[in-house]
Image (tube, grey):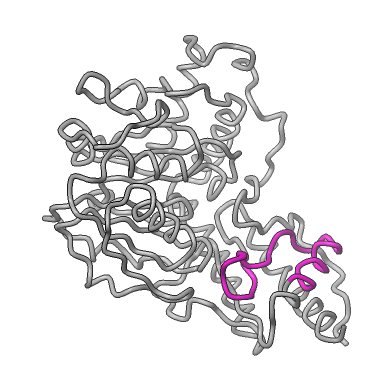
Amino acid sequence: MTERPAALPARPHFSSGPCAKPPGWSADKLNVDVLGRSHRSKLGKARLQYCIDLMREMLQLPDTHRIGIVPGSDTGAFEMAMWTMLGARPVTTLAWESFGEGWVTDAVKQLKLDPTVIRADYGQLPDLSQVDWSNDVLFTWNGTTSGVRVPNGDWIPDNREGLSFADATSGVFAYDIPWDKIDVATFSWQKVLGGEGGHGVLILGPRAVERLQTYTPAWPLPKVFRLVSKGALAEGVFKGETINTPSMLAVEDAIVALEWAKSLGGLQGLIARSDANAAALDKIVEEREWLGHLAEDPASRSKTSVCLTVKGADEAFIKSFAALLEKQGAAFDIAGYRDAPAGLRIWCGATVDTADIEALGPWLDWAYAQTSAS
């Protein structure tokens, strides 16, 4: 029987959302001067604009793209984009995990757009060469629940007629995203930044702005989705004048994470940390015959939400395995997503320390032995 390891990960937070806080985080670091004030006060708008400016800087977002804070986390941001811009052209939706399937459901059942749907099983990436770019195209940059990502932006043509809609919530701040290929992108702070939930971020390129200004959808739009006023883009949304009332506490928390990212050297520092974490977990997998990657192709394997297979495991085994590690304080929230094949999911984004990934290996061995023997 494998002996219980002596050393625990210092921070056993491996959840794929909300994710680990940045190293050294504490509530004492939050600037609380804005709390109790109107978000439309001079101070409130300044803090929102500062958050937007930090995101632009950390993402290396070009001036051609607008960035705004919107309600409803990544889901709200992506559905805002769908409801306000789709319908002008035929639509293609790509799905290889649960969130992509969610956008298929929205396009088929809610908006009734009769889209072309290109699917792949969990762990696989669909044939991207099948995509017709005369259509608007919806996809996840990094499939959080399958551990599969697009390898790059080369499959998106510069002369595309349709718009590219990228749900990038587990991809931004971990990959060098080619923004000239992206017309619409969305994410939420609780993924790679380890921020709090409830708020989404919407990024619009110039072609998306043109669509908003020249196209009116056939369906009614809820107030929280309205990005156009009297035929013009609501520019205030992209300057800290949010559509609804934001949590300024969540905004301040995001600012702390973004300032931490800046202290690392920005985007490249974040990418380096994610790369190191993914490499450490790869080493653990390679050294164990009972562990494997759900995404077999390294070129399309996520570096953030890494999904693993466990030899001979079913859902009950994984549930017991994960519960045992949680009870020991060795790893929290590592069971795979409920709709994915039974397995583990370990977050390797920048807010996780590589030493904690390395310390996890012996605990996986111990939990596997304990669960197999029970």
Which residues, given as a range, are shown in magenta?
A: 319-345
* Image quadrant occupied by the N terminus: bottom right
Residue 130 pos. (x, y %): 22, 72
Q: In this view, does 301 lie above or below 61?
A: below
Q: In this view, does 194 lie above or below 294?
A: above
Residue 335 pos. (x, y %): 68, 67
Q: Residue at x 56, y 70 (%)?
A: 340
Q: Which residue is drawn at 75% across and 68% down?
A: 322
Q: Is residue 226 above or below residue 349?
A: above
* Image quadrant occupied by the C terminus: bottom right
Judging depth in this view, the residue of 177 and 170 nearest the camera is 170
Q: Residue at x 48, y 33 (%)?
A: 71
Whether residue 187 is in magenta: the answer is no
Residue 244 pos. (x, y %): 47, 23
Q: In this view, does 88 lie above or below 372?
A: above
Whether residue 325 is in magenta: the answer is yes
With 163 as the anchor, is 332 left or right in this view?
A: right
Q: Residue at x 82, y 80 (%)?
A: 371
Residue 362 pos. (x, y %): 76, 76
With 80 as the anchor, is 325 left or right in this view?
A: right
Q: How many labels does the image show?
A: 0
Judging depth in this view, the residue of 239 and 340 nearest the camera is 340
